[in-house]
Image (cartoon, helix red, strand yellow):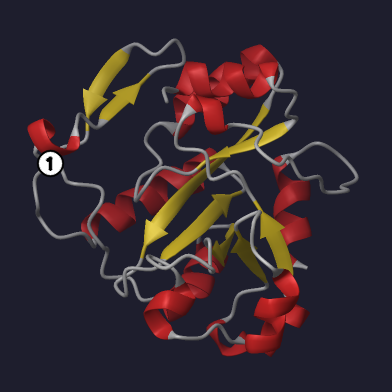
């Protein structure tokens, strides 16, 4: 799942817009965005943040600079646990042709010290938008870890996996009725890209248009 392969498989599968959301880092976004420019595919810089409650939250940014600044901030909030490559594998930083240009030494699967209630305000500061990921999953989700999802958390969107029953979740968690519901592939492997593709109607194919759509 390298930047060049991710972008070009997405292109082959007929996608127009994708987001790269590695766990707790944006360091491969520059490579993916550059590969996207060459392939004619719009790549949104992003991150799947693990909050202090061990909840996954997707963060998308309007600019690469903001994404990288946020990535640096998140790194400063993570515990100083080194990656053990024999157990967890290498955490490579690559260029747009998948050349290795560095490694992330901190273990990216740990939780940051950022609480979920802090995330919406942080997104305002860093020019982005965020939404709780795969809220119907039994682990690393806002519902599994906190038992609820409410408007007071400050999110305008929430993500369900494509197999979820939306009406069932809206009945249990009524605030979802006033949130935009997203279905994403959450692809961790190339063969998962473009599973159950979904569409959004936006005025132009730009990152700003997507971010503004998700903020409504």
Q: How many marks?
A: 1
Q: Residue at x 57, y 89 (%)?
A: 152
Residue 173: tell me if it is visible: no
Q: Is residue 47 visible in this depiction of the protein?
A: yes
User: Eyeballing the image, is 53 above or below 110?
Assistant: below
What is the quadrant of the N terminus in the image? top left
Identify the element where label 1 is drawn.
Answer: loop
Q: Residue at x 50, y 25 (%)?
A: 190
Q: Which residue is mark 1?
A: 83
In the drawing, does residue 127 fall left or right of residue 110? right
Residue located at (27% from left, 27% from top): 92
Quarter of the picture holding the C terminus: bottom right
Query: Which of the two residues, 64 or 167, is positioned nearer the viewer here?
Result: 167
Point out residue 98 in the picture as x, y percentages from the top left corner.
Answer: 39, 13
**In the visual, does 74 lie left or right of 128?**
left
Decide: is 40 above or below 64: above
Residue 144 locus on image (x, y percent): 42, 76
Residue 127: image x %, image y %?
A: 58, 57
Residue drawn at x 25%, y 47% as measured from the top left: 108
Above or below, 50 against 118 in this view is: above
Q: Quadrant of residue 103?
A: top left
> What is the x, y in percent for residue 171?
70, 86
Depth check: give the residue in front, 109 or 205. 109
Instruction: Using residue 185 as the reference point, say whether residue 2 is left or right of it.
Output: left
Q: Residues within 10 Å of mark 1 (few under 14, many from 20)?
A: some
Front-lying residue, 64 or 51: 51
Does residue 102 lie above or below 179 as drawn? above
Quadrant in the rendering for residue 154: bottom right
């Amino acid at each position: 799942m390298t930047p060049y392969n991710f972008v070009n498989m997405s292109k082959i599968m007929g996608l127009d817009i994708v987001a790269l959301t590695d766990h707790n880092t944006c360091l491969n976004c520059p490579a993916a965005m550059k590969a996207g420019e060459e392939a004619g595919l719009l790549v949104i810089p992003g991150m799947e943040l693990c909050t202090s409650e061990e909840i996954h939250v997707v963060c998308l940014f309007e600019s690469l600079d903001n994404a990288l600044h946020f990535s640096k901030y998140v790194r400063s909030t993570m515990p100083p646990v080194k990656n053990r490559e024999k157990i967890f594998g290498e955490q490579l930083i690559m260029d747009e042709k998948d050349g290795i240009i560095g490694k992330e030494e901190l273990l990216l699967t740990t939780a940051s010290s950022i609480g979920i209630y802090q995330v919406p305000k942080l997104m305002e500061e860093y020019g982005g938008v965020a939404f709780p990921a795969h809220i119907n999953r039994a682990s690393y989700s806002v519902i599994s870890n906190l038992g609820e999802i409410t408007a007071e958390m400050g999110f305008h969107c929430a993500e369900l996996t494509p197999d979820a029953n939306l009406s069932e979740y809206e009945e249990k968690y009524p605030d979802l009725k006033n949130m935009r519901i997203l279905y994403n592939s959450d692809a961790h492997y190339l063969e998962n890209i473009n599973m159950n593709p979904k569409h959004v109607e936006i005025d132009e194919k730009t990152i700003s248009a997507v971010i503004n759509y998700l903020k409504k």
